[in-house]
Structures are given as C-alpha cells and as structure tokens.
Image: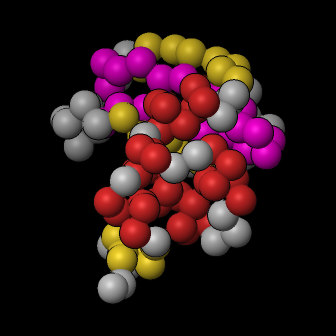
Amino acid sequence: GVWAIHGVRVDEQVIMRPESQTIEQIHKESNEEVRRVRIERFGWERYLHESGARRINDRFNERDHQPESLYRLFDGTNRLAVSDPSTGRRYCLGVPAEIETCEQAQAWMSHGLDARAIHRS
C-alpha cells in the first residue's frame, strides 16, 4: 500500500502507529517534509520534551490571549510554540536561530506588522 498525509508519502508506522516512533527515527529522517509530518504525528509537545529541546523564552501574547514559548532544537534551529486562538491547536513554527524572544519571533514572522495589529482576523 501507499501511505501519505496531505500528499507526503510516509511509511505505515507514521499513519498507523505514530506514537511508536522514536526520536532517533525522527532525527535520522533525511527528507525535511517527511520529518515535519513525523513530528506532527508524534506530537510537538512530546517531541520538544523527549528530544531535549531547550526553552529559551516564554511570554503571554496579549493580542491573541495565548501563551507562547521559544525553543532551541538539537540541530540549533528555533521553533516558536503557539496555539491557534480559534481552535486551541498547539503547533510549532520555524524561526531563524538568531531570534532570542517570542516577541522577536512574532515580529519576524509578520515582517514587523504585528506591532500595528489590534487582533488577528
């Protein structure tokens, strides 16, 4: 059979038993898109905890009324952990390694326009 999520081909484990994946399997994945799907199926919160990601900043985003955390991953990349204000779904967004705060991450993602926004649409 062929196993895929949103057009990304993965192995059966990712679809049928995502919780059985290991951090080693995820880190050894050479295809960036497959690695992203593996982490999403594994769960971002679990991945951050089990991979030893280091939390480098926290804040409460007043505009979205949601907590945010900035993490440094094993490979030196940064991820901003956020919640969707409308669904509560938690996910992580990649930001440059030189970013040191959640506020800087949000400003980078919005090209500085977040400072002028009253609310998200």
27 to the left or right of 35: right
- Which residue is farthest bottom? 1
Q: Position of residue 34 (x, y in %)?
A: 54, 67
Q: Is residue 50 magenta?
A: no
Residue at left 48%, top 23%? Answer: 68
User: In the rendered image, is residue 69 in sight?
Assistant: yes
Q: Position of residue 98 (x, y in %)?
A: 80, 38
Determine the image quadrant of residue 33: bottom right
Judging from the image, the colouring scheme is: secondary structure
Determine the image quadrant of residue 84: top left
Who is closer to the viewer here, 36 or 97? 36
Residue at left 57%, top 60%? Answer: 35
Quarter that holds the N terminus: bottom left
Residue at left 43%, top 62%? Answer: 13
117 to the left or right of 93: left
11 to the left or right of 30: left
Total numbered circles: 0
Determine the image quadrant of residue 89: top left
Residue at left 61%, top 39%? Answer: 79
Who is closer to the viewer here, 103 or 39? 39
User: In the rendered image, is residue 80 in sight?
Assistant: no
As drawn, 38 above or below 50: below
As drawn, 121 above or below 85: below
Q: Position of residue 71 (x, y in %)?
A: 64, 29
> What's drawn in magenta, residue-wise?
64-84
4 to the left or right of 34: left
Q: Position of residue 31 (x, y in %)?
A: 64, 71
As drawn, 70 above or below 65: below
Quarter that holds the C terminus: top left
Helix, strand or loop for the magenta stretch, by majority: strand
